[in-house]
Image (cartoon, helix red, strand yellow):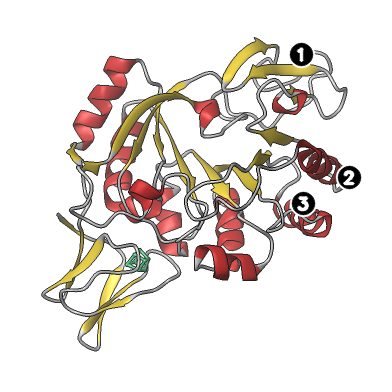
Amino acid sequence: MKEARFWKPENGRVACSLCPHSCKIAPGRRGICGVRENRDGRLFSLIYGKASSVHVDPVEKKPFFHFKPGDKVLSLGSIGCTFRCQNCQNFTISQAQVGEFGLEDMSSEEVLDTCRKTGCKGISWTYNEPTIWHEFSYDTSKLAKSKGYHTNYVTNGFIQEAPLRELAECIDAMNIDVKAFHNEFYKKVCRASLKPVLDAAKLAHELGIHVELTYLVIPGKNDSEAEIRDFSRWVAQSLDPNVPVHFTRFHPDYLMTDVQSTPIKTLDMAYKVAKEEGLRFPYAGNVPGDDRENTHCPKCGELVIGRMGFSIVEMKAKKGKCPVCGENLNMIV
Ligand code: SF4
């Protein structure tokens, strides 16, 4: 247990300012995420150094297609989440309460030792929402950066400005989920809200963090052409047309088993609409072997990175540039 960052006392409670829920927590109670507790008027993280999952993955699996392509990363998760997504694929850990799930104690030094032994070049904070693991991910990422490792977050982007600014000191890349482009979906399906996520994506980009976005396309929920066009236009005009966007295929899970898998023709539409709106690097995800999982130069069309699932099968990009026309591919290598 470790005292949390980003809180202050308020009228006999503690006010947490890590995520936009801004919980006001009474003594002995926890915030919505379930992992931050008011003990005698101070806020504590209950999951500092407590991992639910530790795996070695290709960075492509997060997914990152323009950040350190081909590198292995140590993926770490704990428990808890700020969202309640009905379709969560990791609900056994994201919705677990403290004490319900066996957690492994790990120090920051042990994380880096595991990186070294497994040949990982970086750390990915993933599986459950890393924002609520802030104290441990921040301490460990700072140490990791000092030793030459790279770091990334796979996140729902529901974070306040001050902790995001702090993370920019030590997090190189973020894959941010945009779960839909209308607030009603966020309210009903996730019990959260859209605007803070869009604001965080813009701020992360401004702070120099490499940003990629994932939009899970769910039939009947967020898959209309109008919504995908609005989202793509927002990326192109308010964020950056060079930001890679992964339109991934939904598979039924958790409380959303009554919805079919995303038809390929819907991903066709999303990809086409994204291109029409000016996105330079849209992708289709969860469709191994599909050409839209490859990277093509947006200027001359050359295939610059070929992929099969999460593996790179052809690497022609040179130092993040197209080998034919020299176009910058917005790639951290
Ligand atoms: S991080 Fe947890 S305790 Fe803090 S505001 Fe968000 S949900 Fe509430």
Looking at the rendered structure, the secondary structure element under dot 1 is: loop
Q: Say which quarter of the image contains residue 60.
A: top right
Looking at the rendered structure, the secondary structure element under dot 3 is: helix
Say which label, 1 or 3, has the lower sequence index: 3
- Amino acid type at circle 3 is Ser
- Amino acid type at circle 2 is Glu
Residue 212 rendering spot, x and y as whole percentages: 61, 41
Query: Does the residue tagged 2 have its C-beta within 8 Å of any atom of ligand 1?
Result: no
Which residue is disc 1 drawn over? 323
Residue at 70% of width from left, 12% of height from top?
316
Quick one: quadrant of the N terminus? bottom left
Residue 250 rendering spot, x and y as whole percentages: 62, 43
Looking at the rendered structure, the secondary structure element under dot 2 is: helix
Q: Is residue 305 visible?
A: yes
Neighbourhood count class around disc 3 (C-alpha, 10 Å): few under 14, some 14–19, many 20 upward: many
Say which label, 2 or 1, has the lower sequence index: 2
Residue most toward the bottom?
A: 11
Which residue is disc 3 drawn over? 232
Give the number of the disc on residue 276: 2
Lateral position of residue 253 relative to residue 49, left or right = right
Say which label, 2 or 3, has the lower sequence index: 3
Residue at 27% of width from left, 16% of height from top?
117
Asked if 15 appears above or below 221 in the picture, the reply is: below
Mark closer to the observer (1, 3): 3
Neighbourhood count class around disc 2 (C-alpha, 10 Å): few under 14, some 14–19, many 20 upward: few
Quick one: quadrant of the C terminus? top right
Mark 1 to mark 3 CA distance (whole Å):
28 Å
Mark 2 to mark 3 CA distance (whole Å):
9 Å
Lateral position of residue 174 relative to residue 195, left or right = left
Q: Are marks 2 and 3 in contact (CB under 8 Å)?
A: yes
